[in-house]
Amino acid sequence: MEASEGTCMITAKHIPWEPIATLPEDRKDGRRLLLWEVDLPVIGRWDSDREGWEDPESMHILEEVTHWADINPPV
């Protein structure tokens, strides 16, 4: 499919979501991950002091994280 003049075609790869139970321990190092909480994707990180997932901006604890995916840069 070609984009017509004045439009932009955006493509995205499938996000390889994994159940949170499969998260490798090395991902709990404070890095930001893409998390699925209830019915929304969110950016979060593991807080080892509180032993839970948190929003890195608001520091709010994420209660119902079910899946995760690495955040990968564009290629």
Image (cartoon, rainbow, N blue to C red):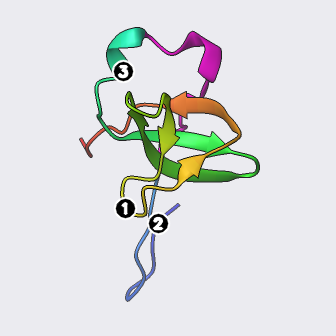
Please rate how many residues cluster around mark 2, counting C-alpha atoms within 10 Å: few if below 14, some from 14 to 19, many from 20: few
User: What residue sits 36% from the left and 21% below the top?
Assistant: 27
User: What residue sits 48% from the left and 46% below the top?
Assistant: 54
Specify the segment rendered in magenta.
12-24
Please provide percent x and percent y for residue 61: 55, 48
Closer to us: 61 or 2: 61
Residue 55, placed above or below residue 45: below
Closer to us: 49 or 41: 49
Going by the numbered disc 3, the residue's amino acid type is: Arg
Residue 66, placed above or below residue 56: above
Instruction: Identify the mark at residue 27; answer none if there is no mark.
Output: 3
Q: In this view, does 17 lie to the left or right of 53?
A: right
Q: Nearer the viewer, mark 2 or mark 3?
A: 3
The residue tagged 2 is 2
Q: Is residue 47 magenta?
A: no
Q: Which of marks 3 and 1 is nearer the N terminus?
A: 3
**Main secondary structure of the magenta stretch:** loop
Give the image quarter of residue 16: top right
Instruction: Identify the mark at residue 1; answer none if there is no mark.
Output: none
The residue tagged 1 is 57
Q: In this view, does 75 lie to the left or right of 15?
A: left
Going by the numbered disc 1, the residue's amino acid type is: Glu
Please provide percent x and percent y for residue 30: 29, 33
Q: Is residue 23 magenta?
A: yes
Please provide percent x and percent y for residue 7: 42, 82
User: What residue sits 55% from the left and 40% below the top?
Assistant: 35
The residues bearing labels 3 and 1 have C-alpha atoms spaced at a distance of 19 Å
Q: Is mark 1 on a helix, strand or loop?
A: loop
Going by the numbered disc 2, the residue's amino acid type is: Glu
Q: Which of marks 2 and 3 is nearer the N terminus?
A: 2
Residue sitting farthest toward the right: 39
Closer to us: 12 or 69: 69
